[in-house]
Image: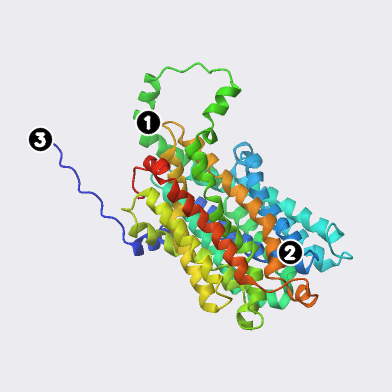
Amino acid sequence: MSTPTPPPEAPKSPLREIVDPFIEVVHAPRALWGINAPYFLEGFCYFGMLGYLAMFFNQHVGLADTQAGPMVGVLTWGITFAMFFFGGIADRWGIRLALLASFVLLIVGRAIMAGGPTLGLGAAGMWSTVHWVSLLGILFIVLGYGMYMPASYAAVRQFTNQKTAGMAYAMLYALMNLGGWLPTFFSPIRKSIGIAGSYWVFAAFTVVSLVFTFFILTPAVVKAAIERAKGERDDADRAAGKEKAADVAPKAKEPFNLIKWFKAHPLADPKFAFFIFCLIPVQTLFAHNWLTIPMYVERAYKETWPWISQNFEPATNFNPLLIFILVPIVTALTQKAKVYNMMIWGTLVMALPTFLLAIGPYPWTLGAYLILSTVGEAMWQPRFLQYAAEIAPEGRTGAYMGVAQFPWFLTKVITSAYSGWFLVHYCPDQETLAKGAGRMATEEMWLIYGFIAVSSTLMLVLAKNWLGKDFKTKAA
């Protein structure tokens, strides 16, 4: 008599998708608390500092917008670059030491950045003493993040088993976004002590993360968590894993061949290369969240909506909260949609609200842009790696997923290179306006940005018959 097949598990409601991560994090073992709590604080510190960074270089270092934008880029793309070189430190030093060392670097970097302007280092300007000191602070922060983020994900991998890993990774994503929303309430502190003074506050919170990690993630806790997770993984796959390993004869290692390496590289696949690079235009809107939105809200709304101008933090930090809420809801509502169609519609919904800002600096256009563009982001961005995995040949998924991150690095570099120019010409500060060197024409700026962003959708539509046939599964 055959064993009856159990009924399929009912899909979770959007409300359960939101609530369950909180339940899981409350019941998480101590080792994961040692990762999750500092990661939450880092979301607050990183996004808080990033939202102020261009203004920091304007106000405290004396750089023009065209100079401040690339400096922000040095931090954002520098972190991506540093992870390439320092991602393996956790494997050599161990999780705990790598995390503690990264927090020390972050504290030093944030303190240096805060200290340069507040201590008074002479005249400001490009390549002045305060500028070099600020770049030194960024260097420490870049090195710290190059170690911190890979070490955090490595810790989750070592502390979890097959059943708990997915939720643990999801919690890191959720907590970083939730922490990134907290600077919404930071405007009273910023107005009281200035941006440089605020950086001292972020440095102090980083000290809290260091202390928390030191006392919660003790060597004994780390060892016990790794051993427990390893035992659980071994119990789950011992029989199948050993039998499979015994049946497969080891293959002789082939000598490295450069020509074969180039031919087998994911970017040698024209469909894959087109797929990831055509998303760069719409991804520029991510970078504008910290390169353009803070200055736009602070400057364009100064005369007509002074309260919004003086309290620009809610606009700058609204996206992480919406992503935290919308991703599970949108995923549940669109789980039957085809992947390629979701990519087209998601990029379109993300890009089109940019044209609302071309109407003018009104509260309703800003609010609609923030909400609608985030809905579009929630439609396609969480599935980005799924798209990469789906177009990858059998056995090459890992390589394709890794290379798929490269355009995000390029997006940070490209957008930071031109964002300052657009601010100077279309959204200048009061001093530039007083000199008659610029004009307030933010409508034109956002119209151009809208056409840039929507070009991703246009390319995807034009390539649908060529590329879309490789996306055969659904988005769920």
Q: Residue furthest left?
A: 1
Point out the frontmost of discs 3 and 2: 2
Q: Position of residue 257 (x, y in %)?
A: 58, 20
Q: Which residue occupies 79% across, 67% down? A: 60
Q: Residues within 10 Å of mark 1 (few under 14, many from 20)?
A: few
Q: Would residue 259 be found to the left or right of residue 110 on screen?
A: left
Q: Would residue 66 be found to the left or right of residue 460 on screen?
A: right
Q: CA distance from mark 3 to mark 2?
A: 75 Å
Q: Earlier in the sequence, mark 3 or mark 1?
A: 3
Marks 3 and 1 in Cβ contact (< 8 Å): no
Question: Quarter of the image holding residue 469?
Answer: top left
Q: 19 or 67, which is in the foreground?
A: 67
Mark 2 — residue?
Answer: 65
Question: Quarter of the image holding residue 289?
Answer: bottom right
Q: CA distance from mark 3 to mark 1?
A: 29 Å
**SS at mark 3?**
loop
Q: Amino acid at mark 2?
A: Asp
**SS at mark 2?**
helix
Q: Would residue 320 be found to the left or right of residue 242 on screen?
A: right
Q: Residue furthest right?
A: 122
Q: Is residue 302 above or below residue 263?
A: below
Q: Is residue 351 above or below residue 361?
A: above
